[in-house]
Amino acid sequence: MNTREVYRFGDCEVDPSRQQVRVGGHVVEAQPKALDLLLYLIVHRDRVVDKDELLGKLWPGVVVTESALTQALRKARALVGDDGERQAVIRTVQRRGFRFVAELAPADIPRDTPAAAAGPPREAPRAVAVLPFADMSAQRDQEYFCDGMAEEIINALSRAGQRVAARTSTFAFKNRPDDVREIARRLGVELVLEGSVRKIGEQLRVTAQLIDAASGFHLWSQSWDRRLEDMLAIQDEIARRIAAALGGGTAPATEPAGAPVGAAELYRRGLAYQHRFGQRAQRFAIELFNQALARDPGYAPAWAALAVSHVLVYRYSWATDERRSEALRAARRAVDLAPDLAEAWTAHGAATTICCDYASAREAFEKAIRLDPGSFEAHYYFARAATETGEFARAAMLYERAAEIRPDDYQALVFAGQAYQSLGQHECGLDAERRALVRAERALARDPTDARALVLSAAGLIHAGRADEARAWIERACTLEPDEPHCRYNAACAYVVLGEHERALDMLETIGLDAMANRAWMEHDFELDPLRAHPRFQALMARTH
């Protein structure tokens, strides 16, 4: 195999010598067998390669089943944004084998130079990896803030056109003592940014260092002592400093340099974290929404979003009266400020749902849908409320509509499948589950650290006859998010589907269900039905809200 040539097709670049794949300029994680399969098909792209040949080349001297090849093929496709439906890169030739069918760019194009670019080759800008910032706060409770700092710097550099390693790659080194040179080698970058955050009250101390991986020397380092409200300005300033160090001029800040970041931008960034679902992400989202409202107390979308994040924390992390009151207060403020805003009524519906005021919730969701029939959130949260009241037909209809509105979302279809199963419509349930699995695999190709996609889709894998892969997904999700109660709850549900009831109960008992608002959901979760007569489960239910 030629290990000197770099293969380019679409926005993908496969470098055999580095054993590396880039998509859109970012290094993506590659499972070794998947990369080996992809490279073998590229090299032999002039013909169809049969299964026996691939099995012999990928697993020489080892007897494996065709399922191993099927999994490697699936991962190879996901690696370059392909799948079994489109087959734009790897095509299955029925009863013959597989063939690489994407069009390769000419081999003499200089690395990192677009195929259509004119003029002589120019030196590629040095790539940088932004590592998760270290939490130096006394209580070690600012991990969400540290992660957000690193992610926003990655986003700012990407917007400025810099070559920056993807979050999914750099966050794999979180809380690990790896040497900077080794990190740079594995990510295929020349520079590494590391830093720390210390938060004391409303004060921040942020330190960042940009390191040349080849020499190990600092190109620059700097510390900032600012108020919490200056957080985003610090992120943009760090991004500009890196851009200057890379020789790329000054990266444009989200707002003009020195100007405060506006409420709308803070709200937009907060939504990005809210959609990640986990408790750390919600805490960071709440911080951003509160900052938006400090700049503009009359900004109704931020009040609505703040309410939803409080609802999510209440449901999945910490169900306190104070949290519920905060959700209601924010939702009511959003409705008062903007009675014609669908997001405001959606937030009001979500907040009244956690108060078990389902009549008010239904009225609010119906108003939201009348105002915006294309609102994913209105349909999704309405469906969640319908599930809690046992209205499974309504829930299934709403989940299906939510899935139509947002074609890349897997969650609505997972829960639609559960609603169908509760209705006894098993074929419909399995069909929704299969559709959800396709979407979840696409989501994981974009972000392999999406623990929710892993754990919610485990049941779909089991029913598809891929139980071993389901166990791997469950373990990977719990490793990625060991402190997320929702992750462990869904892992327990998957163990029930596997028939491992004692293991499921063991996991449920570690969650702290007394701190979560899960009773109404658990009462109607059909996956838990096999446990209901078990004394340990009954004791668990007695502790839930």
Image (cartoon, rainbow, N blue to C red):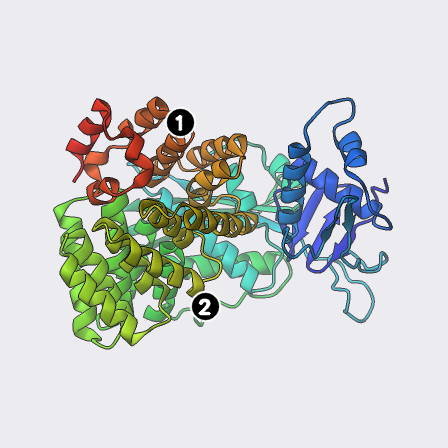
Q: Is residue 62 left or right of residue 333?
A: right
Observer-nearest of 454 and 313: 454
Task: Characterize the local packing of mark 1: few (<14), some (14-19) or many (20 or more) Cα atoms within 10 angstroms.
Answer: few
* 97 vs 284, nearest the viewer: 97
Q: CA distance from mark 1 to mark 2?
A: 51 Å
Residue 248 point in image, percent of width and height:
63, 63
Numbered badge on residue 499 = 1
**Horizontally, is 302 left or right of 121 in the view?**
left
Residue 34 is left or right of residue 527, and the answer is right
**Image point 28% across, 44% down: which residue?**
316
Check disc 2 and give the amino acid type.
Thr
Tell me what residue is drawn at x 25 percent, y 55 percent: 386
Percent coordinates x, y for residue 438 in the rendering: 53, 50
Most foreground residue, 388 or 452: 388
Q: Is the C terminus in the top left, top right, bottom left or bottom right quadrant?
A: top left
Name the residue beneath numbered marker 2.
Answer: 254
Q: Judging from the image, what secondary structure is the residue with disc 1 in?
A: loop
Horizontal side of residue 505 vs 337, given as left or right: right
The reply to whether residue 293 is visible in this rendering is no
**Percent coordinates x, y for residue 482 in the rendering:** 38, 33
- Figure quadrant of the N terminus: top right
- Identity of the amino acid at label 1? Gly
Camera-side residue: 259 or 540?
540
Identify the residue at horizontal 14%, vertical 52% (top origin). Answer: 355
| Secondary structure beneath label 2 | loop
Q: Earlier in the sequence, mark 1 or mark 2?
A: 2
User: Within 10 angstroms of label 2, few (less than 14), some, or many (20 or more) residues?
Assistant: some
